[in-house]
Amino acid sequence: MQRYNKAKNINGYQEIFQKDSPLLDYLAFGKLALVKGESYTGQTDGFETALVLLTGTAAITCEGQTWTGLGGRSSVFDGKATAVYIPCHSGYSVQAETDVEIAVCKVRAEQKCSPFVVRPEEIVVHQRGKRQWKREVHDIIADKADGKVQRMILGETYNDPGHWSSYPPHKHDGEHYPEEPNLEEIYYYQVNPKQGFGVQLHYTKDGSIDDAYIIRHGDSFAIDKGYHPVSAAGGYQVYYLWFMAGESGRTLRPHDDPDHKWIHSLE
């Protein structure tokens, strides 16, 4: 399994990072693209699942409940997200009320919770960092979801042109457990304007990983370990949907790269 997955424009459902991969134990990811009037039916099996509406409007049904008029963004840069949490071992259906794109975020789970909707007014917004590493982070399923989900932590991050996020570089692969949690993570990127790009760095202190990837609209990245800062090119906003889970609960205490931790003194 490759960590970096380049975008493919496919109508219907596409699996991007499959379950039971050699790289990820807890996460899988897909994307659903429907034109107005189309529908899709899915099963979550052993994964609690969040359907994050990227663009468009849809009706979603799960466990005997139907929510209509969900979403409405023209792009991910047009306001806050709407998301539907679907429990593990559940069926669901999506009816496209307009052309719609939905991120399908899957986290391995054994505990069956109740479905719920997160609406834009419920998103918790954080302004993180300063100077060229200032970014906006939207918590979708985070602290307020304690007791409502088993493992999932999910949100969206917005980098202004030329700015960094996940910075100073941090990781959460459990190397320094229990101070550092062991959490896998997946990123799904969008760029504004779409022809733009950014850079995803990925490295470990021992040098076994020391990579850089060009971020383009619709690409995805799986993070099993290591530091993973993101930069937006000049003139272009970079967005990424992120979600994570692992063996160490839902508390997020990232471990900063000691060489760059001093940058916090500038904030």
Image: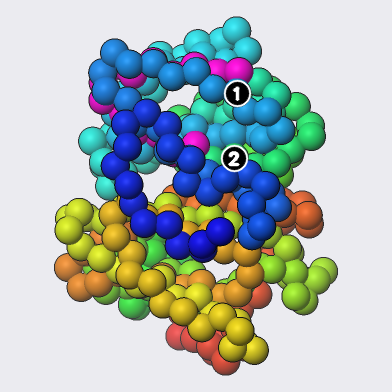
- Magenta residues span 91-104
* Left or right, 120 with reference to 160: right
* Left or right, 12 with reference to 161: right
Can I make out residue 137 in this image? no
Give the vertical position of 248 relative to 226 (above or below).
above
Residue on which the image places disc 2:
106
Precedes in sequence: disc 2 or disc 1: 1
**Can you tell which quarter of the image residue 212 is in?**
bottom left
Q: Which percent across, then down, holds residue 140? A: 51, 42
Q: Nearer the viewer, mark 2 or mark 1?
A: 1
* Left or right, 205 with reference to 51: right
Residue on which the image places disc 1:
43
Give the vertical position of 204 relative to 155 (above or below).
below
Neighbours of disc 2 within 10 Å: few (<14), some (14-19), many (20+): many
| Numbered label tally | 2
Residue shown at 32% from the left, 47% from the top: 8
Residue shown at 26% from the left, 18% from the top: 36
Quarter of the image where the N terminus is located: bottom right
